[in-house]
Amino acid sequence: MTTVSRATLETPILDATLPSLLHQITEEGGYAFSSMATRAAAGDTRAAEAAREVAWEQLHSGPWHSVVPIWRDAYAMACLHVAKHQFSSGEFKLSLRALDMGLIMGGLTLRDDLNLCIGKVSVALREKEFSDNGGGEHNGAWYKDFNLAEVVKLLPVRSLSCKTVEKKCGLSLEGFLREHFVSGSPVIITDAMNHWPAKDRWNDMNYLNKVAGFRTVPVEVGKNYLSPDWKQELITFSEFLERIQSSDCSSAGLTYLAQHQLFDQIQELKQDIVVPDYCFAGGGEIRSLNAWFGPPGTVTPLHHDPHHNILAQVVGKKYIRLYPCSLSGELYPHSESMLSNSSQVDLDNIDEREFSRMLDLEFLDCILEEGEMLYIPPKWWHYVRSLTPSFSVSFWWSDEVNSPES
């Protein structure tokens, strides 16, 4: 353990590009940052912390899309400097948190350095944990089945009373293209992830804790992103797992790791899944690969997305309701541009006087079972509720001809 604490973190890309990066940052007015970063590179811990604070302020100086890209690289650089100092002092957890923040908020230029350092810090942390705790593990089981009759009582009105989404086994890529992709019709594919390591591994809490427990992840707390009590937090993955196990069932206490690019951040989890062949239909490209992980009762309100979507249910079960894009005018979308892809209607508590048209609209719905994938065509409205502890992966892709802007 003493040997590890005296080791250093290597940052070959940062070392090679530091002068160029500092020049670009200076051109964007970052004179103070460049001075601090230069001292940080020479071993000044306080300068490293100060540089990180300066970059953080720049990232929050306005809307995210308006942030000058070089400041994201500046933040990643500062996180690397901070992490190197903390690692050399044996503060492995703080070092790993700094590196994760660099991945979550930083630019792409130094991503390989961040991942290289994360690998080394993670090994040191696991060795220390084993030394301190003797490798003891907690109960790995965390998912139990549920009573369907009880769960249905919690679903929106008319659930499972209309047409359900068609299920298919052994669906070929050609069949998917012809029968669903071209026509834009949803389908559940029942056997496309049987070969995924995640099917077994992610059902084991000990595995998830060992692989990702020390990592810092962004989570949502509250009913959903349209609720006034909704907020975001940064916590460790192990703390997140504890919240799922203790599961505060009140909507205000729900914690959800939602629409996060977890697999870009934690490579070990990415190795447990495989991009489905269906995602190459249309000759386009993967736009986003996101994790959706949380306790029973998490809700994604009625909304639509611009891309083709395969939602893979790796652990647990979800209820999903779908309305075709042809009904968009009847679904009361928000008028604000930021929320125009979301409905004003709370399906869990419909105001029948204000949204009377909703009551008679036809829809498709389903319970997406563990091991199944649901294809959601672009612009189809969907509402999602977890019925058990649930871990899902969404694959967004665009087709070559009608590729929407990202």
Image (cartoon, helix red, strand yellow):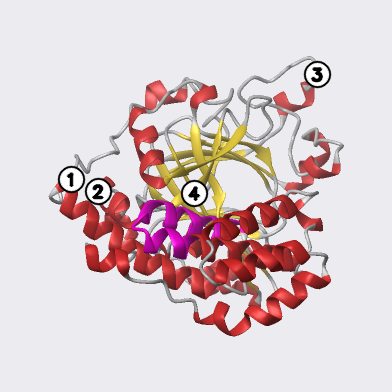
Q: Earlier in the sequence, mark 3 or mark 1?
A: 1
Residue 40 in the image: state x and y as whole percent.
57, 66
- Taking the spot 83% from the left edge, 39% from the top edge, the residue there is 329
Residue 75 in the image: state x and y as whole percent.
64, 61
Residue kind at label 2, given as amino acid type: Asn
Q: Earlier in the sequence, mark 2 or mark 3?
A: 2
Q: CA distance from mark 3 to mark 1?
A: 52 Å
Residue annotated with mark 2: 206
Q: Dividing the image into 4 quarters, which one contains the N terminus?
A: bottom left
Q: Dividing the image into 4 quarters, which one contains the C terminus?
A: bottom right
Q: Earlier in the sequence, mark 3 or mark 4?
A: 4
In the picture, measured across the screen, residue 190 lies left or right of residue 301, that is left
**Dot 1: element:** loop
Residue kind at label 4, given as amino acid type: Val
Residue kind at label 3, given as amino acid type: Glu
Q: Residues within 10 Å of mark 2 (few under 14, many from 20)?
A: some
Residue kind at label 1, given as amino acid type: Glu
* Any part of residue 31 in sight: yes
- Taking the spot 12% from the left edge, 50% from the top edge, the residue there is 134
Are circles 1 and 2 on residues that touch, CB within 8 Å? yes
Residue annotated with mark 3: 354
- Identify the magenta region: 83-105
Q: Earlier in the sequence, mark 4 or mark 2?
A: 2
* Any part of residue 395 in sight: no
Pick the front one: 36 or 194 = 36
In the picture, measured across the screen, residue 284 lies left or right of residue 162, that is right
Q: Earlier in the sequence, mark 1 or mark 2?
A: 1
Residue annotated with mark 4: 217
